Image: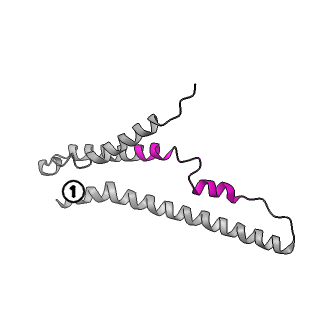
Amino acid sequence: MEFIFGILVLFLILPFLAAAATWIADQRTKRRQMEMEHQERMAALGKGVPLPELRSLDVAAQMSGGGRRLQTPLLLGIVFLCAGVGAILALLLISDYEISRYWPLPLPLALVGAGLLLFHFLSLERGN
């Protein structure tokens, strides 16, 4: 049973924590960049100097999910499907019957990934 918990931690919890930490660090970097640009613009405005160009419009569009919103289900679908199928194969390839009988455990993960991929491909705009 401890082995199943180890597999669960390895395939589900650690990738989620790594993705969450990466996302949080990315958001903090973008926010700092926007704040720094705002301070530069306020200082230039106070001195009467022409205002620097707005680079944060691109950053703000990225933070709100501008162009990447359509790619998110595709990316998550690939990750979930691969993690689920990999965990299923790992559990099936274990020769110990007591452990390999838990192969359906990651099946919902694989099905969520397949559903996200299906959603992505059905929601694409068809060009005429």
Residue linked to disc 1: 4
Identity of the residue drawn at 12% across and 47% down: 97
Q: Is residue 75 magenta?
A: yes
Q: Residue furthest left?
A: 98
Helix, strand or loop at label 1? It is helix
Query: In the image, residue 63 lies at what x, y percent?
Result: 58, 57
Q: Quick one: label 1, few (<14), some, or many (20+) residues within 10 Å?
A: some
Amino acid, disc 1: Ile
Tell whether 47 sits left or right of 82: right
**For residue 17, above or below residue 89:** below
Tell whether 38 sits left or right of 4: right
Q: Which residues are magenta?
A: 54-77
Query: In the image, residue 128 lies at what x, y percent?
Result: 58, 24
Q: Nearer the viewer, residue 69 or 82?
A: 69
**For residue 58, above or below residue 42:** above
Q: Is residue 28 magenta?
A: no
Q: Quadrant of residue 111?
A: top left
Identity of the residue drawn at 28% across and 47% down: 108
